[in-house]
Amino acid sequence: MYSRGGAGGIGFGYNRAMLSRLIFTCALAAAATARAAATDCDRVCLKNQLDQYLNAVAKHDPSATPLGAGFRQTENAVVVRVGTGMWKTLTGLGKLQRRYLDSVSGQAGYFGIVEEGSESAIATVRVKVERRKITEAEWLIARQGDPGLNGPAAPGQPAGNFFDPDNLAANPPPERSLPKQARSSRETLMAITNSYFDGITTHDGSIIRAYPGCVRVENGRTVTGRSAPNGGGPAGVADCTSNLATINIQMVAARRYPILDEEAGVALALAVFLRKPGTATRRNVLSEWFVIDQDKIRSIYSAMFYPPGEAPVPNWPPYDGNWPLPALTPPGAR
């Protein structure tokens, strides 16, 4: 706008209010440009970045994938140095592979079977891509013989964790691209997924937005649709909404939803199941892939592990503490 200059003349300077607004607008535009540059990676780009990273890990060669300067990787919530952990043990991807992509969050995920020499494992892998480089990699891995709900295997007894890669391969998540009119929005995918955790926390399956008979698969093992012992008919685990009144879960904590793949109709949720007070049962840290059709849960596929009580989980911001603190912690330090 015009403003009067000295000696009654007319100047062309902006007044302070307009200048402040202009600076603020420019700052917002710069921030938006920076964000766009950081996440300028579409579905094709994300898939390529994910595959390049997984191939590099299988080749045991960190130089074969573009890693950000602050790259951070965890395996079952433990930070590992580049070149160690899965960088040494992974030898290839298995017979069941699924990839899910979220160009809004700039994250991509792998769910399926991975090979470590002659042994198979079931894994969820989440990577974050910024400026065409991998800055984060989070692995949740289930292996044969891992500790389960009651800890490590006792002598002469198998571990308590479920593990069945053959069943997972025979009953896989769908591999699909939904037509646009059949897709749920990001907000809806998250809300429906969250309804499942709310149903568990409140012990009320009616809260969960799911189809009757919805399937749940944990570390490859189908845990729904089971019959009661002695031919007593359907058990309380008929579907993913059943048996919640007595389930030993006090709370579903540290909920995160890093990948919302609208095209596939799949949401990735990461969380921690906390047990009821006074029980010795271990927590479990889980990745769950929710397959959602017409705004309802059709099936759930998990890769999870059972950490010891002192382990800080999930070890990713904003929930990078311990859930809960160990029982041996002095009361004044809680």
Image: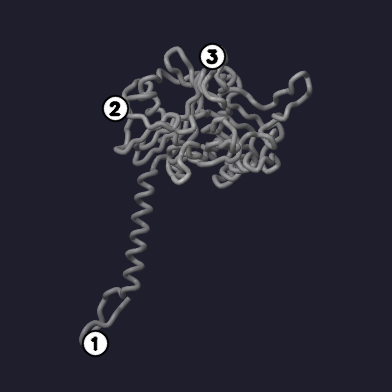
The residue under the point 64% across, 26% down is: 223
Marks 2, 1: nearer the viewer? 2
Name the secondary structure under disc 1.
Answer: helix
Q: CA distance from mark 2 to mark 1?
A: 68 Å
Neighbourhood count class around disc 1 (C-alpha, 10 Å): few under 14, some 14–19, many 20 upward: few
How many numbered marks are there?
A: 3
212 relative to 267 in the view: left or right: right
Examine the rendered structure and indicate whether residue 212 appears above or below residue 189. above
Q: Estimate the x, y position of residue 180 in percent, counting from the top left.
A: 57, 41
Extreme residue in the right direction: 232
| Residue holding disc 1 | 8
For the residues labelled 2 and 1, say whether their Cβ atoms are less than 8 Å apart: no
Name the mark on residue 155: 3
Q: CA distance from mark 3 to mark 2?
A: 43 Å
131 relative to 115 in the view: left or right: left
Q: Which is more N-terminal, label 1 or label 3?
A: 1
Neighbourhood count class around disc 3 (C-alpha, 10 Å): few under 14, some 14–19, many 20 upward: few
171 relative to 138 in the view: left or right: right
Q: Residue flagged by tag 3: what amino acid is it?
A: Pro
The residue under the point 24% across, 87% down is: 8
Marks 3, 2: nearer the viewer? 3
Picture quadrant of residue 171: top right
Q: Nearer the viewer, residue 145 or 109?
A: 145
Q: Residue flagged by tag 2: what amino acid is it?
A: Ser
Q: Which is more N-terminal, label 2 or label 3?
A: 2
Examine the rendered structure and indicate whether residue 58 appears above or below residue 275. above
Extreme residue in the bottom direction: 8
The residue under the point 50% across, 37% down is: 327
Extreme residue in the left direction: 7
